[in-house]
Structure formats: C-alpha cells, structure tokens
Amino acid sequence: MASRKRTLLKVIILGDSGVGKTSLMNQYVNKKFSSQYKATIGADFLTKEVHVDDKLVTMQIWDTAGQERFQSLGVAFYRGADCCVLVYDVNSQKTFDNLDNWRDEFLIQANPNDPDNFPFVVLGNKVDVDGGRSRVVTEKKVKQWCTPKNNLPHFETSAKEDTNVDTAFQCIARNALKNETEEELYIPDTVDMNAQTSTKRSSGCC
Amino acid sequence: MDTLPDAFDIIVLGTGLPESIVAGAAAKAGKRVLHLDKEEHYGSQWASLPLEEFKAWSTGNTSSPICSGPVKLLQASSADLGASQQYSIDLSPKVLFCSDELIDAVLQARAHNSLEFKLLQGSYVWSSGQLVSIPASRKDVFKTQLGLADKRALWRFLKHASDALQGQGPLKEAFDDTPLVELLKTQGLSKQLRPSMQALVSAAEGKAAFARYLASVARYGQGSGAFLALMYGCGELAQAFCRVAAVHGALTALRHPVAALLVAESTGRCTGVRLATGQAIACEGVGESKAERDRDRPSSLRGVCRAVCILDGSLHREHSSLSIVIPPGSVPGPDGNPHAIRLLQSGAAMSVAPPDRYVLYASTPWTGRDAEDALRPALSAFSN
C-alpha cells in the first residue's frame, strides 16, 4: 500500500484557457490530437506508466477541467501535487505574462513545504502555428523568466505535431519523482474507497 | 476574462454539498450546466476555511442559516496558533458513516478520485468523568475494560442485533417493536454499558441508526470503526462534486453574485438569472438550496449551538481524530439541556491544523441558551 502510493505521481497542468493543456496531455498519453477546441470534458486525469532511470512510476496527470476559465480552480485541485506544469502559447504574449499569476496561485493554494524548490516545468506550446511566423514569445524572454527561479526547465512544444512532448513529460516525471523522494516519507493511512465496493456494488441495480 | 454564455439548461447557485451534487448529476446527465458562487472559495456553508478566512467569516456573516446568532470570538491566551493556511476549519463539521448513502454517491459519481478519507481513530462516551471507548466490533468488546459478564452480554447483544437486522435470530421481532432503550435493558446490558450503546443513536433515529452503525463498522475491514473523516476537512466533499460537474462540461465560476432570478410573468416560471454585472442568462431551471437562498436573510431558525476550539493538545493520549458523546447531565454546570453534547476533534494527521494543534468542534441542539453557556461546561471538563 505504502509503496504503491509512493510511486504514484500527481502532476497538474496550469495555464490560460486554450494554450493546449488538454492537447498536450492527450498527445502524450493517447498519442492523439484533435484540432477542434472543446473546453475539456470527460476525464478527471490521465495516467501513464513511465520509466525514470530504472524505476517504474505511474504519472497521474490532472487537467483543469475548464475551471481555470473563470479563475475557479479550488484548493482541492492543487493538493498533493508532485510537479506543476505551466503552459503558455508562444503566439500569445498574455498567456506568457500570466505564468507569474499561475505560479503564485499554485504556491499559495498548494502551500508546498519548500516553495523555492518546488518543481515547475514550463512549456511553450503551439510552436507549429504558421510555421513559427506568428510567434511573439522568444526563447530568450522565457529564459529570463526561468533562470532566476532556480533554472526552471523549459521546453517548446507542439501538441499537434508531437514536437518535444515526450521529452518534456520525461522531464516532468523525473522532477516529480525527485520531489516525491526528497519529501519526508509520509505514508498516508487513507482508506481505499474502492476496496469494499465490488462486493457492495454487486447487489446494486447499476 | 472570458464572458459567460447567455444560455444554459440549468444554473446552479452556490457550491455547497447539495448544490454541487445536483450540478454534478445534471452535468453527467448531459445538461449544459452553469455553476455559480458569489464567494472566493468553494463550499458555501459546507466550506472548510483557513484560520484567517474563518475568522473573517465568523465576524462578517452572522445572518446565514448555519450561523443565525451572534458569533463570539474568544481567545484564551495569546498562544501562537500557527500558520493560518495550515488550518482547514469546517463550517459544517461532519464525519460520515462508512455505510452512509453519501459514500455511495461519492463512489457513483467517481468523486473519490479527488478525495482522501481516513477512519476516525476512536469514538468515546464521557462517563463518570472519563472517556469510555465505544466498541466498534464484537472483537473490540473483548479489548474493553468491562467485566466478563458485561462483555458477554454486549457481545451477545451485538450478534443478535446484527442477525435481527437481517431478519434472523431471537431478536428479529423484538428489534422492530421495542424501543432501543428497553431492548438494551431486557438484553441484560448493565447500567454502565447502556449509555455507550445509546450514545450511538439518538432516540429519534433508533433502529435505522443502529443498523447503519453496524453496517458501517464492517465496511472497511474488521474492527476499523464506523466513521470516515475527510483529509483537509469537509469542504473537500463539495469541491469534489464541483469537479465532477466541471469534468462533465459544467462551467464553474466563483465570485459571480446573482442579483435576481428572472421570472416569466405569464407562467410564473423562472427563466434565468441576472448577474450582479447586469448580464442576463437564460435557463430551463435554477437549482438552489434553501440554505443558499436564505443566506442573506435574517433567519428565525435556531437549531444548534456550536463551538470551534483550537487546542494545543489532543483530548486523547493516542488518538488525534475522535468523537466524544457527552450524555445529558454528565458534566457539572447549569442543567436543563436534555440533549447530548457532541465533540469532534481533528488535527495535523488530517491536514486540518498545524503540527501540535487540534481543531475541536462542539455542538448540541439549541434549547434557548446561549452557545457559550450551553457548551462551556463540557469543554471545561476537558480543560485540565
């Protein structure tokens, strides 16, 4: 029980609406991309088993479920995150400027033990758009933002063309795992809510 | 910021537990749902708040149904309470029976993905100046301090009671016809034992509550206790259902007060809402709990006296999360309250308080007395 918990990594993806958070997840986990935008529907989180060095870990990637549209992500969403992915759209200055807000919001709400060293990974998405001609956020600007914050890892990605997506998530997994093991080993004695449900359910009508 | 669309199937006002369950169910059923709350945070009257926000709430919001009387903030000492953010104080403290229908609702909606439950470590009754453990199972009976005759009687009673609830055994008729108090007497439970059994259930609920209790103790393993408590407080429950709604397409917006309900003159039906911003949004139906609707109106309803205390030590040597029932008349002080006083303690292990700090909720039905008068004797009994 304890060891199962330990290798389950919770990753949350933050950023403005429409920067491609769901697309990045979907490309990484399901190898699928849909150019049709719909505000995130259907999945609480996606999971993927990843090898980090020789260790097999399960990454649970949590989407905002559209609750970011009106700044309505509740504190519960942030709890227990091992890594926070900050996504912006390289073609939109505003989405990059808002990274500060998302990072602050995360640190306030999640209240991690060691805020200065909490692993964030920064993704600039949609590098494919217009063959890169509509880009407004340069790599240099992002570097300037990431460097003073303990050198936050940064990747430029395209969920559509599957550019850098695997590499980015590999880094996310590695950082999440590092955070997990560096944290004091807290073994939660929480109840597995599903443990008794199979027998209970069998008598139900659905 | 985005603007809200102008039409939905259903608009749910407030993010308390009932409202959130409705929003989740409607969104799952394929309705276009708009879920609004005027506050900064989720949970309405079901929220769990950091200490400073809780203080602000308690001084600013005194006319809501859960808080109809004046709220007093007392400070016993200038002791350091620790970081406000490490607290999660319930506006509606609650532990759940393991077999509670709400648990089934949580599982059915798959809301448990974002929830963490722990078993309440102990249930006690205050008897003759000490905490007496309420046995959670027949096995527990033998670990108690009871004499052999009492152990036998209690063991036999629990067995017969659980048989009777399945329509079997010698008690199957008696269980339906006899009030629990009488039943305990006729089954040979001594005076010492009866209070702890009675403490489990209120007279009004009787058999149903006892059945729920027995079903609860077995649900998550032998001897595991009957109650579940939520990590980070009860506010998580409402939030989990809000997320279910959002995951199924509901649009959620905090900090969106509604100024008016729009009603069609011809039919008298509600056809939408007008936001404080002036925007009108049409819908087929509005979902709102009574408590939410009455939130800003003075209410004549005065149901429960409640105290929230912050302790620098646990009421129990080993346990940090526990419930205590204080039967009427068992603590000195002004009498006249025919009801039990219930205490619920939680702490850092549940992530609702900083290390070495505990949150204690005390409550008793209101009988005309000021909450402080009604609860202080019980709290004083533990203050040494």
Image (spheres, coloured by chain):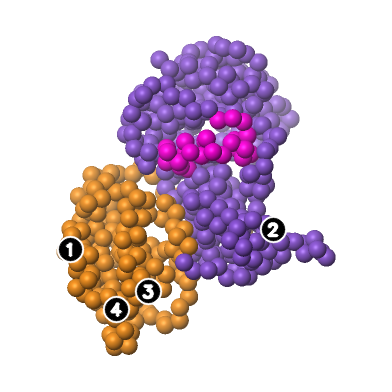
Taking depth in this image into account, of B112 and B352 the one nearest to the observer is B352
What chain letter is assigned to the residue under label 2? B
**Which colour is chain A painted?**
orange
In the image, which lettered chain appears purple?
B
Task: Point out which mark residue A147 bears.
Answer: 1
Mark 3 or mark 1, which is nearer to you? 1
Is residue A143 inside the magenta stretch? no
**Does residue B306 sit above or below A103 in this rendering?**
above
Residue B297 shows which numbered tag? none
Q: Residues within 10 Å of mark 3 (few under 14, many from 20)?
A: many
- Distance CA(mark 3)–CA(mark 2): 36 Å
Q: Where is residue B195 in the image (x, y as percent from the top left)?
A: 58, 20
Neighbour tally class for label 4: few under 14, some 14-19, many 20 plus, Cα within 10 Å: some
| Residue matched to label 4 | A136
N-terminal-most mark, 3 or 4: 3
Q: Are marks 2 and 1 in contact (CB under 8 Å)?
A: no
Q: What element carries label 3?
A: loop
Same chain for the residues under marks 4 and 2 in the image: no
Most extreme residue toward the right is B266
Tell me if I can see residue B327 in this picture. Answer: no
Magenta stretch bounds: B48-71
- The residue where tag 2 is placed is B261
Contact between marks 4 and 2 (CB within 8 A): the answer is no
Q: Name the residue under label 3.
A: A20
Q: Where is residue A153 in the image (x, y as percent from the top left)?
A: 20, 65
Q: What residue type is labelled 4?
A: Val
